Every structure is written in structure tokens, then in C-alpha cells.
Image (cartoon, rainbow, N blue to C red):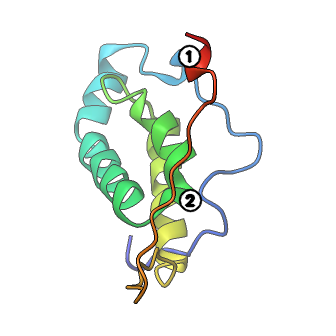
Amino acid sequence: MQNSKPGDTPVAKGDKFSLNQCPKNSLESQEMQKIPYASAVGSLMYAQVCTRPDIAYIVGMLGRYLSNPGMDHWRAAKRVMRYLQRTKEYMLTYRRLDKLEFIGYSDSDFAGC
């Protein structure tokens, strides 16, 4: 993936994922077993949780198919990786403030209870 063309967006417009894209026979399943899909999605989840909330939607969608991914799911995961390659300078930055201020919010009717 290091030498691949960087992606502009983490998901293509109109991409839809469904169970119809999962392998339909043992040959397709065997092909997908050679691909490190679960490892790739796990790595994307780590990046999403730690520093990249911009990929949360697509990573959640890809995570739905961990048990039986198809080639369309794998291509989508690679697209996210290409997007991350292009935007590797994007990150969450936490800064230390001299004056610490706590802010709390509550629901005035205790969530309707």
C-alpha cells in the first residue's frame, strides 16, 4: 500500500455494502481467506479510535463483514488505507491549557424518567 495512489475520500460516493457482496461459494471463500481483511479492519479501527474519527463511518461499515468479507469489502478497506496515506498529516491534537475548566451538561427531566 506504500506505493499506491493516494485516495481523495475514505469512501466512494454511492458505495453500498450488503450480504450479497459476501462470498457465495467455497472458491470465493478460500480466496478471501488469503487476504488479511480482519487485520486491516482492526488496524483501521485502532486509527479511528485514537486519532482519526473521520473514518469512523466506513470502518463501522467494514466491521460488519468481518466474519465473511467479499472482494468489494476488501477494495473498500484498501481505499480507506489509501485515504489515510494521503492524509497522514491529519490528526487530533490535544493541548494542555493553563486554566483547567470543567463543563457539565445534564438533561433537566432526567431523560424522561
Point 36% across, 61% down: residue: 47
Local secondary structure at mark 1: helix
- Residue 24 falls in which quadrant of the image? top left
Point 60% across, 69% down: residue: 7
Mark 2 burial class by Cα count in 10 Å: few <14, some 14-19, many 20+: some
- Identify the image quadrant of the N terminus: bottom left
Q: Residue tagged by mark 2? A: 54
Q: Position of residue 61 (x, y in %)?
A: 51, 35
Mark 2 vs mark 1: in front: 2
Q: Nearer the viewer, residue 77 or 3?
A: 77
* Residue 80 in sight from this viewpoint: yes
Q: Position of residue 48 (x, y in %)?
A: 41, 56
Amino acid found under the numbered disc labelled 1: Asn
Residue 95 is tagged as none
Query: As displayed, is residue 8 above or below residue 10?
Result: below
Q: Position of residue 113 (x, y in %)?
A: 55, 10
* Residue positioned most to the front: 108
Mark 1 burial class by Cα count in 10 Å: few <14, some 14-19, many 20+: few
* CB-based contact (under 8 Å), mark 2 and mark 1: no
* Residue positioned most to the right: 14
- Please tell me which of labels 2 and 1 falls first in the chain: 1
* Residue positioned most to the bottom: 98
Point 41% across, 77% down: residue: 100
Q: Nearer the viewer, residue 88 or 33?
A: 88
Q: Residue tagged by mark 1? A: 20
Answer left or right for 101 relative to 36.
right
Q: Position of residue 84 (x, y in %)?
A: 48, 69
